[in-house]
Image: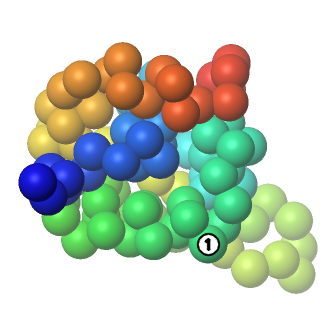
Amino acid sequence: MPRSPNSSPHTRAVLQTLLHTHPAPIHGYDLSKATDLKSGTLYPILKRLHEQGHLNAEWEPSPHPGKPPRHIYTLTASGIGLAREKPEQATRAMKGALI
């Protein structure tokens, strides 16, 4: 039986972290630390959620001169609804305390 979209433990952990910080935006680095996901796992999840309309991704100028801008992420209304579905799945996938 195929898995339903956005139901992997990693995706659920990302959604729960975003829900926990909502409405404040969060950087990918902070999401990586909170979920203990490596960039090769995290950023494809963020890209997919953004393409599906569950996530806003905006560029933020770096506060440090000479450093490139960074993406900040927030949940959309549909993302909030998705994050509230079966949150107990994500709890097991998360490293521990959230930001």
Q: Is residue 71 visible in this depiction of the protein?
A: no
Q: Residues within 10 Å of mark 1 (few under 14, many from 20)?
A: few
Residue 57 % position (x, y):
40, 62
Q: Is residue 85 visible in this depiction of the protein?
A: yes
Residue pictured at 16% horizontal, 31% vertical: 81
Left/right of residue 50 with respect to residue 94 in the rendered view = left
Quarter holding the C terminus is top right
Nearer to me, 74 or 3 = 3
Residue pictured at 27% horizontal, 45% vertical: 7
Q: Is residue 2 above or below residue 39?
A: above
Can you tell which quarter of the image residue 47 is in? bottom left
Left/right of residue 88 with respect to residue 1 in the rendered view = right
Q: Name the residue that disc number 1 marks.
A: 40
Tell me, what colour scheme is on the image? rainbow
Nearer to me, 8 or 76 = 8
Can you tell which quarter of the image residue 49 is in? bottom left
Residue 6 % position (x, y):
26, 51
Quarter holding the N terminus is bottom left
